[in-house]
Amino acid sequence: MDRGDNKGQIARILVDFLEVAITSIVFHKGVYPSGAFERRRYMNMVVHKAKHPELEEYIHSAVNGLFPFLEKGSVDRVAVIFFDNEGTPLERYNFKLQVNQSFGSKVEESDLGFSLRSFLLKLSLSKDLARVLPRDCRWEVTAFFRAEAQISTNNDVELWIPTDTKQWQNTPLITPLKSMSSEPLGLQLYMEHST
């Protein structure tokens, strides 16, 4: 397997994982009624998938729009941010990514999947660490890039739009949830909340 195929394989695994993880976060935060989700199996465990078409499409298109940037290694973090009705952040779940772009060996999807599965388990347990959000809160998926991401001319690539998200007014509290460091992927999951 050449490096180009390897990068694509790693990016595809990450896209699939992030779609499930983001859906899990939204489900556990209780932003929508539980009827908006259905139970599915992923990596040999029960997870939740958005059943409402617009919710499912938002998460799916946001994460799949990252594929070319993940493949190039230009994504630093993917965050799920919850806001109050004035747009001030209440809580942020961050997935900090480090992909070894020069990794030349074949990626064993089962090994990587086993490591990523532990993040999903930790997410289901982290709901007790988080605060209850107000009923009128909103949320979004935001990506942070390492450098100026080159825009592809491919029509299949949805462009990411710079956010006008307000930043924390005070330094947030950071709660580390899970991290892994293995070839070719390093991943940290941490939660930020207002003080």
Image: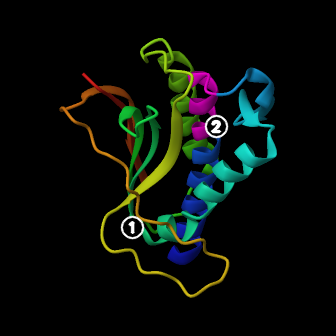
Look at discs 2 and 1 and give the one toward the viewer. Answer: 2
* Element under disc 2: helix
CB contact under 8 Å: marks 2 and 1: no
Q: Which residues are magenta?
A: 21-31
Q: Residues within 10 Å of mark 1 (few under 14, many from 20)?
A: many
**Quarter holding the N terminus?**
bottom right
**Main secondary structure type of the part rendered in magenta:** helix
Vertical placement of residue 122 versus 20, above or below: above
Q: Can you identify the residue that label 2 sits on? A: 23
Q: Name the quadrant containing residue 158.
A: bottom right
Q: Name the quadrant containing residue 81.
A: top left
Q: Residue at x 43, y 52 (%)?
A: 185
Q: Residue at x 59, y 64 (%)?
A: 65
Q: Can you identify the residue that label 1 sits on? A: 74
Q: What amino acid is at disc 2?
A: Thr
**Quarter holding the C terminus?**
top left
Q: What amino acid is at disc 1?
A: Ser
Vertical placement of residue 4 versus 162, above or below: below
Q: Is residue 97 magenta?
A: no
x and y percent of residue 89 in the render? 37, 36
* Element under disc 1: loop
Q: Which mark is residue 14?
A: none
Instruction: Work out which residue is located at the far bottom of the displayed protein and give it.
Output: 153
Vertical placement of residue 144 versus 31, above or below: below
x and y percent of residue 129 in the render? 42, 14
Give 146 or 4, whichever is nearer the viewer. 146
Give 105 or 194, whichever is nearer the viewer. 194
Q: Earlier in the sequence, mark 2 or mark 1?
A: 2
Q: Residues within 10 Å of mark 2 (few under 14, many from 20)?
A: many
Q: Residue at x 51, y 69 (%)?
A: 71
